[in-house]
Image: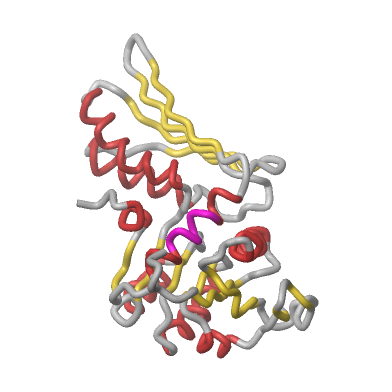
Amino acid sequence: MNINQKIIKLGVAGVCGKMGRRIFELACQDKDFELALALEKKGTPAIGRDIGKLKISSNQDGVFLIDVFIDFTTAQATEENLDYAARYKKPLVLGTTGLSDGQINKIKEASNVIPIVFSPNFSVGINTLFTLLPEVVKRLGSDYNIEVVEAHHKAKQDAPSGTAKKMVEVLTDAAKKNIPTHSIRLGDIVGDHTVIFCGNAERIEIKHQAHSRDLFALGALKAAKWVYGKPAGLYSMQDVLGDKK
């Protein structure tokens, strides 16, 4: 952070969830942030309990008090949170997956008012792959078949994952053909994504394995620092990492 830039007042939605809690905990360890809002949906038993120096709140008007809002929740909760971020003109880091086309259109509309970093995956490694995969396709040529396999924990509801969908989008644009995907939901797998390139006499597999949710949380915090002060617009982690030309 620039030495002249003030500490960012951060709000975290879904703070009792696995991702929200970890984002909150890691932000507490980062001198560039001041935690100003710990948000949960109405009816959550934890409402009113202490978390760090805050109390868990269900009051979305608390978005007014923050500088940047991070949301890794559910499709319905994100749609509501988006309204408050736009109402109070607060930058948003959005990692919710499983959104409908209508909800994605709503995000695009809100980006006319506020800056939004929207990504299916905030891992630096995965976003590096998004940049590298088109070059692999180009070098291998049309003789190679391509498929994507993704695996997540058994509680993950959307399939294929948002990351797999983005991989398919990137690969389809480069290969100009349909790319099959396969989804696995087992145990407590944090997130595995494999791209398989298969020719007549060889096979190449490019795999990314998430060992901890920390890599997503740290990526989200990196995005929160980057988006602070940016003009309205829809951004991706490629923008945050400087990969877009």
**In the image as oriented, which residue stretches furthest toward the front?**
3
Horizontal placement of 232 versus 223: left or right? left
* Residue 137 sits above or below residue 115 on the image: above
Which residue lies at the image location 35% right of the left edge and 79% below the top edge?
114
Of residues 194 and 100, which is closer to you in this image?
Answer: 194
Please say whether residue 183 is one of the residues in the magenta stretch: no
The answer to whether residue 117 is visible is no
Residue 54, percent across and down? 70, 79
If the image is split into quadrants, where does the N terminus sit? bottom left
Rendered residue at 31%/72% (across/down)? 230
Residue 227 placed where, x, y %? 38, 68
> Compared to 105, does 160 lie above or below?
above
Question: Looking at the image, which residue sits at the far top?
Answer: 201
Give the image location of residue 83, x and y in percent.
46, 84
Q: Is residue 137 above or below residue 55?
A: above
In the image: residue 219, left or right of residue 112: right
Let me know if residue 144 appears in the view: yes
Q: Nearer the viewer, residue 181 or 24?
A: 24
Q: Nearer the viewer, residue 189 or 127?
A: 127
State the image coordinates of residue 211 (x, y, percent, origin top left). 61, 39
Q: Which residues are magenta?
A: 218-223
Q: Residue at x 54, y 74 (%)?
A: 10
